[in-house]
Image: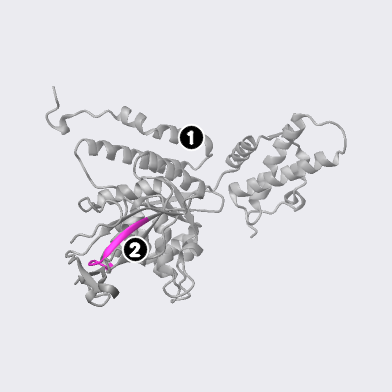
Amino acid sequence: MTPVAPTDDTLDLGAALADSHVTEVLAKLDAELVGLAPVKTRIREIAALLLVEKLRMQAGLSAGPPSLHMSFTGNPGTGKTTIALRMAEILHLLGYVRKGHLVAVTRDDLVGQFIGHTAPKTKEVLKRAMGGVLFIDEAYFLYRPENERDYGQEVIEILLQVMENQRDDLVVILAGYRDRMSRFFASNPGMSSRIAHHIDFPDYAPDELHDIALLMLEQMQYRLSPDAELALVEYIGRRRAQPNFANARSVRNALDRARLRQANRLFSRGGGSLTRDDLMTIEAEDIRASRVFADPVVSEAEP
Amino acid sequence: MRITQGAFSFLPDLSDDQISAQIEYCLGQGWALSIEHTDDPHPRNIYWEMFGPPMFDLHDAAGVMTELEDARRAFPGQYIKLNAFDSTRGFETMRLSFIVNRPSREPGFALIREEAAGRAMRYTVRAYAADRPEGERYE
């Protein structure tokens, strides 16, 4: 018997879920990115919404495509760009964007040098991003209130128009540091209201940073000796208290420098044979040689 | 008289969806799209005006379609064509070119005969539209 009306059908959520591979992507997200609980929750919600929207469409219900422009705010190194890349992939799997590529730009790629240069430049970037995700890093630079003739305003106007009229063609993600972004949105209420998802990236806790470090080392095929393990914990504690701490990015830099020192240590040993183990292991001295350990511990209160 | 230049010109005009699909094909081949327009329909008129620079690094037809909409708004009564350029070594040339917009009335061509030396006849064609100055030809 054929179904009479599409509304009487039962739709298989499980099949749709399996069909979209979205569970795999979300699992990968959980496994490869440490912490970021609020971000992951929001991504899960968006994924659920898109999936349900797909089923609603099959059932003949339609509410129009949801607006998915987003703003990512958070301190340096909290994973905004990484998540944006993932987001493009997720939205592509859910069929919201057609191609799923990410075009990452900053102010320089959008704002022109002279009158009449900005609009074509911005439009070219927008055209390149169509069918995917446009990621504008440090978006608050677009608006410079101190200079009323700044061309950034023109970019914002063009962006707003495209975000409104062609929302099924591209998704715009604005990213930047929290306080500056809130000032940017305060002075551009039109922009703020067109962005449906304001996602805040929290700072990582020390143990999350530790997990991130281990994950990075695993990807680079290094490992820590037990002593180095302790040194790393102490390093993270000290580095967090210092100025210009950039979360995961600082950890990555620290590991890169530790690799440098490890290589130098092996090199200066002169002759003798090296085992595969030697090549892989980072010792405590590689980490403890950092200038972070040279400085006295600064308290959180100090600038 | 409907002019027939480029691909698909013997078919009925392509719909926007069909144009979109052609663009998708071009992008899939790695070709760069560009838009050109003219109001001189002569077949030997190979120098059409560019509408904006060629569009490189595009991933989706929507970008070209937006540009095409702009072109149609700016030159509604002119011929507009899409060119697809292949930069592969050995080709380095247009691989596909087709008209996507044409004037509502195309008056066609006059055959012009010229008496040459020794009672020889020379023939040429001239577009009726070209009698009027550039920019006022299809109004």
Looking at the picture, how far across and down is residue A28, in whole percent? 48, 34
Chain holding disc 1? A
Magenta stretch, residue numbers: B74-83
Residue picked out by circle 1: A28
Find the residue positioned furthest to the right. A271
- Colour pattern: one colour
Is residue A45 located in the magenta-colored stretch of the structure? no
Disc assigned to residue B110:
none
Q: Left or right? Give the position of A17 relative to A259.
A: left
Does A155 sit above or below residue A135? below
In terms of image quadrants, where is residue A267? Answer: top right
Find the residue positioned furthest to the top. A1
Find the residue positioned furthest to the left. A4
Residue A294 seen from this side:
yes
Q: Left or right? Give the position of A154 relative to A81.
A: left
Q: Amino acid at mark 2?
A: Glu
Image quadrant occupied by the C terminus of chain A: bottom right
Residue picked out by circle 2: B36
Q: Which of the two marks, 1 or 2, is nearer to us in this view?
A: 2
Does A255 sit above or below residue B66? above
Task: Name the residue rendered at 49%, 43% in the picture.
Answer: A36
Are marks 1 and 2 in one subunit? no
Looking at the picture, how far across and down is residue A242, in whole percent? 66, 54
Q: Left or right? Give the position of B11 relative to A111.
A: left
Is residue B80 located in the magenta-colored stretch of the structure? yes
Q: Are marks 1 and 2 in contact (CB under 8 Å)?
A: no
Looking at the picture, how far across and down is residue B45, in whole percent? 33, 66
Q: Left or right? Give the position of A55 relative to A291.
A: left
- Neighbours of disc 2 within 10 Å: few (<14), some (14-19), many (20+): many
Residue A38 seen from this side:
no
Front residue of A17 and B21: B21
Q: Secondary structure at mark 1?
A: helix
